Image: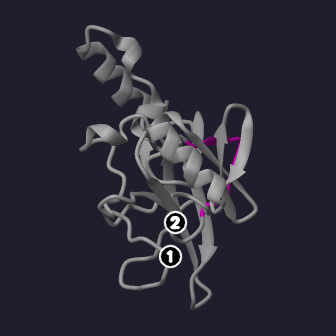
Amino acid sequence: MARAHARQWLDEGGMARRRTMTAFGRITEIWRYPISSMGGERLDGTELAQGGIPGDRIWGIIDRRDGTVAAPEKRKHWRPLPNLVARLKGDRPEIGLNGSWIDAGSTLAGELVSAFLDFPAALHPHVRFGSEAQDHIAPRYQRADIHIVTSASMNRLAGLLEDPSQVDSRRFRPNVVI
């Protein structure tokens, strides 16, 4: 149900301004994905900063054989990757595997991800577009600051499928579900 809310503020000249905003839904899920293409962590709340949710998609994974960046939606050998989960501890991601959490920058993390995928892989921090740094990788695409999906969209998609249980918000890797 939509509800209208009025906000007032003073502009630069000290004049009172008023804007009406309409609420159109309620946030039901908040997610952060510290490592691109991997599963993420569900949050109870978060700050929203310039650039999106802090710590979201800040690292990536490459195939050490050819240097390509993970693309589970395009290449079959990456498809198991979303089954691994990552969380943020401080300002560094950790990978969850077999009930343990391992620092993503450790040698062990690279070895475990390689064993999980059955080919040599490496984890590295992302660099922003237009900048360069050693031991960093560029993301495959310039991402939006925040990814939002609605339950209405997921329900519509579920209605089109023979098996509606396939529609899970995590499949779309959103930051916010409304």
Q: Residue at x 57, y 50 (%)?
A: 111
The x, y position of residue 105, in whole percent, is 63, 63
Disc 1 and disc 2 in contact, CB within 8 angstroms: yes
Q: In this view, which residue lies farthest toward the top?
A: 162
Q: Where are the magenta residues, as a range?
A: 40-48
Which mark, by number, is residue 135? 1
Instruction: Compute the Cα span from label 1 to label 2.
Output: 6 Å
Which of these two is toward me, 60 or 135? 135
Label 2: which secondary element: strand
Q: In this view, which residue lies farthest toward the bottom?
A: 13
Magenta stretch, main secondary structure class: loop
User: Is 74 drawn above or below residue 169 in the view shown?
Assistant: below
Residue 135 appears in the picture as rendered? yes
The image quadrant that residue 9 belongs to is: bottom right
Which of these two is toward me, 117 or 131? 117
The answer to whether residue 67 is left or right of residue 81 is left
User: Is 67 drawn above or below residue 160 in the view shown?
Assistant: below
User: Is 114 drawn above or below residue 28 in the view shown?
Assistant: below
Q: Residue at x 76, y 62 (%)?
A: 90
How many other residues sit within 10 Å of disc 1, few (<14), some (14-19) or many (≥20)?
A: few
Queried whether the magenta region covers residue 145, the answer comes back as no
The x, y position of residue 81, in whole percent, is 45, 40
How many other residues sit within 10 Å of disc 2, few (<14), some (14-19) or many (≥20)?
A: some
Queried whether the magenta region covers residue 46, the answer comes back as yes
* Between discs 1 and 2, the one toward the N terminus: 2
Q: Amino acid at mark 2?
A: His
Write down the residue under mark 2: 124
The x, y position of residue 16, in whole percent, is 60, 76
Q: Amino acid at mark 1?
A: Asp
Label 1: which secondary element: loop
